[in-house]
Image (cartoon, rainbow, N blue to C red):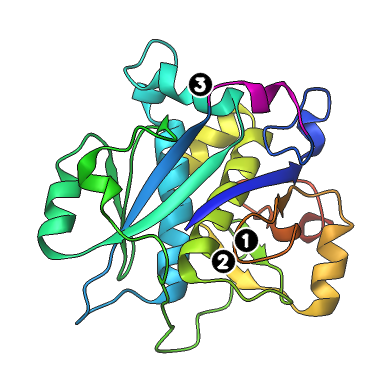
Amino acid sequence: MSSDDTSQSPAREASPSPFHHGPTDRDAAPQYVLPLVVHLEKTAPPARTDALRTAARAVLTILADERSTGEGEWAGAMRDWEDARIRKVVRRARGAEWRKAAELPGITVTGGSAEVRVYPPIPLDGWPKELAKLQVSGTDLDDPEPPAAPDPEGPVLWLNPELEMSAGKTMAQVGHGAQLAWWELSDTERKAWREAGFPLSVATATPERWRELTASGLPVVRDAGFTEIAPGPTVVAEGGLRFCPLPGVRNRR
C-alpha cells in the first residue's frame, strides 16, 4: 500500500516539511518512493503487530545504514527521496517472488514472525520488474494473540484509534512515524538506538490518550488522504525511557 503523508515535527519547523499538505517546491522535484516488501506466505502469515514493528525497524535500518549517508552508494537516492514528498509503498511476496525480491539490493529485517525487505528509493515510475509485479492492495493480517503492552524502555508508535487501515497501509504509516522520530534525535541517541537493534512498540491509543498525544508536541504523521482514509493524523511517535528519548507525554511522568 502506498502512503504519501505530512507531519508535524517540532525540530524541523524551520524548513518545509517533506510530508507537507499543500503544493511546495518538493512537489516540483522528481518524485521517489521507498519500497518495502513483506514476506507473506499463505500458510504462515506474520502477526500484524510484529509486521508493523518490523516495517518501522526496516525504515530505521536503511536510514542508519552507511550506504545511505555521506558518499555511500544509496546516499544520492536517499537525498533525492527526501527532497520530494516522503513516499513509501508496501508490497507483499511469497515463494519464488520473495526469493527474487530478496536478490535485489536492499536490507531484510526480521521480527518475531515477520520479514520485511527495504530497498533504496526509486523513481515513482522506475520499479524493477521483480517488484513491479508484486501486489499492493489486500495486505491484511491479524494478531493470533493480544499484543504485549508497549515496552517503556523503547519508543511507541501510537495508532489513531478512529481509523481502519489495511496492514500494508499501516506499515507505511508506522514507517513514517519511525522516520520522524529518527530525525528528532542527536547522533548519540541514534547510535544507542541503532546498536540496540531499534527496539520499539506499536499500539493503538485509546481515544483519550490519542487526544493527549496529538496535543503534546510529539511528532505526528498526517496522511494526505490519497488512499484508504481521509486526510488527517494517523501516528504519533512517543519516546522511550532508554531509547529514542523524545520530549513529551511519557517523559513527563
3D distance between C-alphas at marks 2 and 1: 6 Å
Residue 45 sits in quarter: bottom left
Q: Earlier in the sequence, mark 3 or mark 1?
A: 3
Q: Amino acid at mark 2?
A: Val
| Image position of 95 with respect to 133: above or below | below
Q: How many marks?
A: 3
Where disc 3 sits, the SS reads helix
Q: Looking at this view, is 61 or 38 the one in front?
A: 38
Magenta span of residues: 23-30
Measuring from the top left, give residue 63's x and y in whole percent. 46, 33
Tag 2–tag 1 contact (CB < 8 Å) = yes
3D distance between C-alphas at marks 3 and 1: 28 Å
| Image position of 122 with respect to 147: above or below | above
Q: Looking at this view, is 132 or 106 the one in front?
A: 132
Q: Amino acid at mark 3?
A: Asp
Tag 3–tag 2 contact (CB < 8 Å) = no
Q: Earlier in the sequence, mark 2 or mark 1?
A: 1
The residue pinned by badge 1 equals 156
Q: Residues within 10 Å of mark 2 (few under 14, many from 20)?
A: many
Measuring from the top left, give residue 71's x and y in whole percent. 38, 10
